[in-house]
Each structure stands twice: as C-alpha cells, then as structure tokens.
Amino acid sequence: MPDFITKKPCIDICEFNKHDICKACGRTHEEKKSWKRLSDEDKQAIWTRVLASHGSGTSKQEKTLRALYRKAQEKSARS
C-alpha cells in the first residue's frame, strides 16, 4: 500500500482568485473546507495537482509548498 501524504498543503496565505482557487496552495475553497473528510487517495491527488500547478516555480511560496510536501513525505516514511 502506498504512503499517501495527507497533511494539508496550506502555507497560511489564504487568498482566492476569481475562480475560487487559493493563490498560495492551489486548492479550491471547497477542497479546503472538506479536507478532513477527503479520502487519503483524494488528498494525494490534490497534492499531485497542487505541486504541478503551484509548486513548480522558484518563488518563495512555491518553495515553501515543496518543502512542506517533502517534510510530510519524510514523516510518513518514518511512520
């Protein structure tokens, strides 16, 4: 069974664009509200999408998002 990253990708900068997507973490408002109720598979799918859309550049926010994911991966591997 794969290790899913279930920690939320929030980097504490919540600002939504006109499409209701957080400019910092890339989740929709609904995804943020329902995070605790989502399956591990759904959370991992969101992480995959978020890293591709909001975590692939060189800005401070993008680096923070990638670092948060790596930290969650390391914690998951130790468990």
Image (cartoon, rainbow, N blue to C red):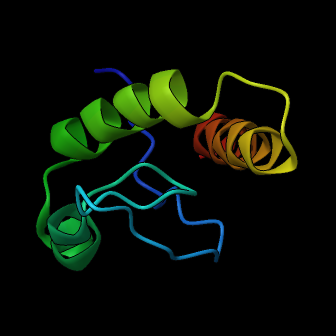
Where in the figure is residue 26, as x and y percent of width and height? Answer: 42, 48
Q: Is residue 41 visible?
A: yes
- The residue at the far front in this view is 18
Horizontally, residue 45 falls left or right of residue 77, namely left
Where in the figure is residue 16, as x and y percent of width and height? Answer: 40, 69
Q: Nearer the viewer, residue 63 or 4?
A: 63
- The residue at the point 63 percent across, 32 percent down is 55
Q: Nearer the viewer, residue 79 or 63?
A: 63
Would you place residue 72 above or below residue 19 in this image? above
Q: Which quarter of the picture shows residue 36? A: bottom left
Q: Which quarter of the picture shows residue 37? A: bottom left
- The residue at the point 64 percent across, 41 percent down is 69
Horizontally, residue 68 falls left or right of residue 22, namely right
Where in the figure is residue 31, as x and y percent of width and height? Answer: 21, 62
- The residue at the point 15 percent across, 68 percent down is 30
- The residue at the point 24 percent across, 70 percent down is 29
Q: Nearer the viewer, residue 15 or 37?
A: 15
Q: Is residue 3 visible?
A: no
Where in the figure is residue 27, as x and y percent of width and height? Answer: 34, 54
Would you place residue 6 above or below residue 29 in this image? above
